[in-house]
Structure formats: C-alpha cells, structure tokens
Amino acid sequence: MSDDADAREFSVAQFFADDTWAYDLRNVDGRTAVERAKALTESVGGRDGTTRRVIVTDGGDFTVFEWTFGKGVTYPPFNPATGRFGE
C-alpha cells in the first residue's frame, strides 16, 4: 500500500444489527473513506444501533479504522499518554 492518503485504496464497510454487512464505498481515497465512515457513525443508524460497526480497510484489506456502536472508535486504540488514536 502507498503511504499516499489520496491513493484510491480504501473501502468502507457497514455492519448491521441482523449480522449482515455491506460495502458502503470501495476503492476511494483516504479522505473520502474517513468522511464517509464519520457520516455513518453519526447517522440515524449509528445513533440508534441499527449500524453496529463501521470499518475502513486499506488496499491490502487490513483494517485501519473501526467504530463499534456503544463503544466508539475501537481501532486504532486510544493512547492516553498522547491523547491521540494510534500512537
């Protein structure tokens, strides 16, 4: 994977309360993927729990972001020493 966040190598998947899931976006740049993941977590489904989980994966199909209903961002982990995620 390229270090360039503008590379179209990211996908966003949404997981539902009935244990189904679907890609919401595929092969988009990093900014678009993050903006869409944020929108999904703040949507009606994200607030009422019908959306249970949202992930962003990179071009190698590695999870680079995960949000879980009732927990918030679960990956990358929050580092209390730095006050940031993933450090």
Image (cartoon, rainbow, N blue to C red):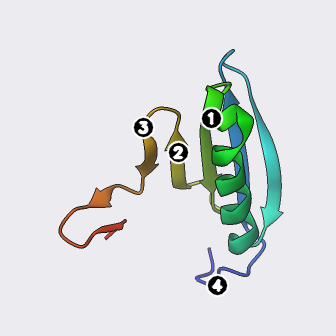
Disc nearer the start of the sequence (3/1): 1
- The amino acid type, in three-letter code, at marker 2 is Trp
Q: Residues within 10 Å of mark 3 (few under 14, many from 20)?
A: few
Q: Residues within 10 Å of mark 2 (few under 14, many from 20)?
A: many
Could you tell me which quadrant the N terminus lies in?
bottom right
Give the numbered dot on residue 67. 2
Give the numbered dot on residue 4. 4
Determine the residue positioned at 81% across, 63% down: 27
Q: Is the C-beta separation of discs 2 and 3 under 8 Å?
A: yes
Q: CA distance from mark 2 to mark 3?
A: 7 Å
Say whether residue 27 is left or right of residue 82. right
Q: Is the C-beta separation of discs 3 and 1 under 8 Å?
A: no
Marks 4, 1: nearer the viewer: 1
Give the numbered dot on residue 47. 1
Marks 4, 2: nearer the viewer: 2
Q: CA distance from mark 4 to mark 1?
A: 32 Å
Q: Is residue 46 above or below residue 42?
A: above
- Quadrant assignment, res 8: bottom right
